[in-house]
């Protein structure tokens, strides 16, 4: 894989990509253990509203675990995580509030196979936000158009290609009007020709000013839209920098090694 | 040599097109089918012949026994006389007993002028189940489904109309309390939804029903459970237990899979104890032991006790079947639901259970078929299920010594019911398969 691969062909519109002073996510001194295994060690990370952060690192370094902690799919044991000013604790009210504010896309899409695409998209707005069905459907169609598959609305997920499914998953999250989007390797289960269509959708989101944290190894994407790249190893943040500096001038030995492996230098 | 060869191959023009021809005789119709399915090899052919012989042997024993012109006869001795007179052996059925006693086999000692009540109940039951089973009927019809249990109770047991009506009102009160309080606090709402109807049932139903009966004595003649019998008793116990055990079994399965330590352990203990002891023991418990625990003087209907026991028993099995289904739902589905902010109950109801139950359909229906047949065990605690009635029929002088005819009749009834359930399960599976792909 090279840096130039999957870089969007068109010019990226940066007019909306503004980082504001407002803090979207603030993680301080966060630690997590799986049993006795110390997966995340003293994580400190502040994300401003409008930031687009790419997280990379070798397999097993805790990238997934980190972003899954942000919407409480995993529970952290030490430190604090604040999302939009609400602290993640075992208070169920806070967890539900944060989850409906934070959208998440998974490596394996996790669409609901027994519901149509449209039902997948309207389920949470109807049941969690109590949106009237008709309004929810209109919103869903709007987002399905945005990810360019409105004609698939009445099919079931099993009838769609991987790339289409991932775009539906993105639309499904967007239907909840989240203020933050988390992506956990959204393209790594896809064939090369489908990767681009999903990345294009993500780039469009970035252009609209969405706050995003993406775990991905698509370095082209990172260079094009990220304003910060975070490198993790052994459960720790080893290096973070703006993309140009990060790729051209990595500081730590681990980062250099990782980049040389992944970029095939 | 090679020169001529290449010439022949490279130079070919068809001048006359070939007509379509029939395949050779051995590749057509019955002959082909026979050859492929029955005689594809020597061993296969041999097996076919042996099997045909066995089938013929069995049928040659059964068919003459079944084919017996004894429908109109009134007693076993009459049958023997007629059959001997016809020069036939006495190894033939005496169908007169079915004509004479079919009502008893179906309804037990239920008063004959009230046979319309269980019959109507069955029709209403099927009509009420249809929207639930086939899911293609408008939603408002489900309200009708919800009302059926009360109508059925009234039809079967009779008594004043007010008691089942008030029990239904209790449920409505529970729903109203839940709706009203759910905005305030979920846990309070759930508690209220349980406590309000229970209090209503315990303290208000009886006096109100008494007053209403006094002022407006509307209702049907009361028929005690001890008069219930025959196939009707099996259906009453079976259907009630099936309908009650499905939600209970699902709750137990969810309990067993839950993160809450106490809930998990209680579910496991309940399931293992109920499952680990034979049903017949639980039935004896229902009939004998419960009397010790109940306050003296209360006579808690034996049929109801049996229904409760059979329900608990089958719920334990359903719970295990559903647990298998829950385990087969990928973890990603739970995470997908969580990440959208769905609550536990929402994600169970909307995401996990629809998928888990779909996987569990064959196992669930299998359990129900077993349960339905096990209702015949109640004969051992003195209830007159169809098998119990066979001895009652034999006790009369007319039919002393008759066995097989009755068992065949009962067997056919059970077969129809169980086969129907099996077909339904297959239909539902293919339907759901079709919908999701
Ligand atoms: N539920 C779990 N229980 C125990 N250990 C776990 C669990 N989930 C993850 N781990 C371990 O935690 C470590 C970090 O896992 P994580 O999935 O966060 O890595 P990752 O950086 O996302 O890797 P990859 O690039 O392969 O997705 C791994 O060593 C993994 O084995
Ligand atoms: Mg991962």
Image: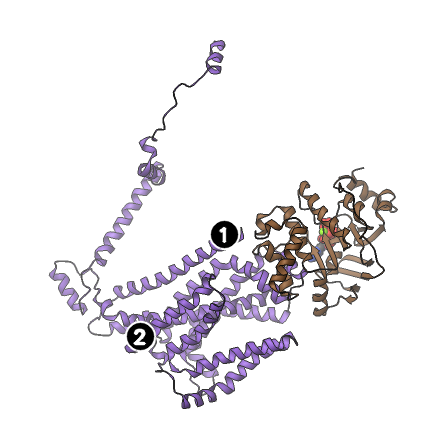
Chain colours: A brown, B purple
Q: Secondary structure at mark 2?
A: loop
Mark 1 surroundings within 10 Å by alpha-carbon count, few (fewer than 14), some (14 through 19), many (20 or more): few
Residue B16, given in percent of the width and then of the height, sits at 38, 20
- SS class, disc 1: helix
Q: Residue A108: in sight, yes or no?
A: no
Q: Nearer the viewer, residue A181 or A12?
A: A12
Q: Which mark is residue A255?
A: none
Left or right relative to B69: residue B326? right
The image quadrant of residue A113 is bottom right
- In the rendered image, the vertical position of residue B55 relative to residue B279, given as above or below: above
Give the camera-side residue of A188 and B100.
A188
On residue B115, which mark appears?
Answer: 2
Q: Tags 1 and 2 in contact by the CB under 8 Å rule?
A: no
Please indicate, yes or no, whether residue A124 appears anywhere in the rendered image: yes
Mark 1–mark 2 distance (CA, rounded to whole Å): 42 Å
Number of other residues with Cα within 10 Å of mark 2, as a class: few under 14, some 14 to 19, many 20 or more: some
- Residue B257 percent across, percent down from the top left: 60, 64
Task: Examine the image and state in which quarter residue B22 appears.
Answer: top left
Q: Say left or right for B343 vs A71.
A: left
Q: Quadrant of residue B63?
A: bottom left
The residue that label 1 is drawn on is: B434
Residue at the spot 75% in from the left edge and 51% down from the top edge: A215
**B422 displayed left or right of A60:** left
Determine whether, in the image, residue B266 is placed left or right of residue B63.
right
Q: Indicate which disc, 1 or 2, sits on the residue closer to the N terminus.
A: 2
Front position in the image: B293 or B302: B302
């Amino acid at each position: 894989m090279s840096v130039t691969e999957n870089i969007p062909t068109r010019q990226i519109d940066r007019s909306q990509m503004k980082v504001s002073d407002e803090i979207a996510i603030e993680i301080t001194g966060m630690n997590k253990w799986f049993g006795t295994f110390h997966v995340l060690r003293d994580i400190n990370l502040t994300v401003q509203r409008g930031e687009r952060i790419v997280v990379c690192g070798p397999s097993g370094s805790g990238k997934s675990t980190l972003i899954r902690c942000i919407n409480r799919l995993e529970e952290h044991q030490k430190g604090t995580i604040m999302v939009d000013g609400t602290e993640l604790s075992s208070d169920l009210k806070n967890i539900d509030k944060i989850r409906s504010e934070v959208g998440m896309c998974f490596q394996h899409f996790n669409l609901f196979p027994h519901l149509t695409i449209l039902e997948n998209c309207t389920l949470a707005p109807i049941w969690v936000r109590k949106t009237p069905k008709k309004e929810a459907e209109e919103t869903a169609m709007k987002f399905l158009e945005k990810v360019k598959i409105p004609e698939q609305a009445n099919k079931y997920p099993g009838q769609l290609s991987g790339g289409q499914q991932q775009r539906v998953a993105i639309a499904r999250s967007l239907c909840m009007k989240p203020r933050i989007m988390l992506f956990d390797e959204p393209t790594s289960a896809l064939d090369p020709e489908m990767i681009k269509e999903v990345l294009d959708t993500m780039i469009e989101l970035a252009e609209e000013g969405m706050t995003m944290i993406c775990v991905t190894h698509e370095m082209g994407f990172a260079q094009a839209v990220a304003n910060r790249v975070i490198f993790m190893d052994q459960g720790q943040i080893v290096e973070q920098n703006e993309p140009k500096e990060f790729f051209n001038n990595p500081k730590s030995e681990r980062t250099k090694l990782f980049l040389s492996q992944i970029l095939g230098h | 040599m090679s020169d001529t060869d290449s010439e022949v191959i490279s130079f070919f023009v068809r001048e006359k097109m070939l007509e379509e021809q029939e395949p050779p005789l051995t590749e057509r119709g019955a002959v082909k089918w026979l050859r492929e399915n029955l005689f594809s090899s020597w061993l296969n052919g041999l097996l076919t012949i042996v099997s045909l012989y066995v089938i013929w042997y069995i049928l040659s024993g059964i068919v003459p026994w079944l084919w017996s012109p004894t429908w109109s006869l009134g007693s076993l001795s009459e049958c023997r006389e007629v059959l001997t007179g016809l020069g036939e052996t006495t190894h033939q059925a005496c169908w007169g007993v079915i004509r004479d006693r079919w009502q008893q086999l179906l309804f037990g000692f239920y008063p004959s002028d009230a046979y319309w009540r269980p019959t109507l109940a069955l029709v209403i039951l099927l009509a009420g189940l249809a929207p639930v089973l086939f899911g293609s009927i408008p939603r408002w019809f489900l309200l009708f489904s919800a009302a059926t249990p009360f109508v059925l109770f009234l039809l079967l047991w009779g008594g004043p109309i007010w008691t089942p009506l008030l029990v239904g009102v209790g449920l409505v009160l529970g729903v109203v309390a839940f709706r009203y309080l759910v905005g305030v606090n979920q846990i309070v709402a759930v508690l209220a939804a349980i406590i309000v109807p229970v209090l209503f049932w315990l303290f208000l139903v009886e006096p109100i029903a008494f007053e209403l009966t006094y002022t407006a004595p509307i209702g049907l003649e009361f028929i005690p459970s001890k008069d219930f019998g025959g196939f009707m008793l099996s259906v009453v116990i079976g259907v009630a237990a099936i309908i009650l055990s499905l939600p209970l079994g699902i709750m137990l399965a969810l309990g067993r899979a839950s993160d809450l330590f106490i809930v998990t352990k209680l579910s496991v203990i309940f399931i293992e104890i109920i499952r680990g002891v034979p049903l017949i023991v639980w039935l004896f418990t229902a009939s004998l032991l419960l009397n010790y625990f109940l306050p003296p003087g209360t006579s808690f209907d034996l049929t109801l006790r049996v229904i409760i026991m059979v329900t608990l028993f089958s719920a334990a099995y359903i719970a295990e079947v559903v647990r298998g289904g829950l385990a087969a739902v990928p973890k990603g589905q739970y995470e997908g639901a969580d990440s959208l902010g769905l609550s536990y109950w929402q994600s169970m109801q909307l995401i996990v259970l629809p998928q888990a139950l779909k996987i569990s359909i064959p196992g669930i229906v299998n359990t129900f078929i077993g349960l339905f047949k096990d209702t015949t065990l109640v004969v051992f605690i003195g209830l007159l299920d169809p098998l119990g009635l066979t001895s009652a029929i034999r006790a009369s002088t007319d039919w002393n010594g008759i066995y097989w005819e009755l068992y065949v009749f009962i067997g056919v009834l059970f077969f129809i019911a169980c086969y129907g359930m099996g077909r339904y399960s297959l239909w539902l599976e293919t339907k759901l398969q079709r919908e999701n792909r």
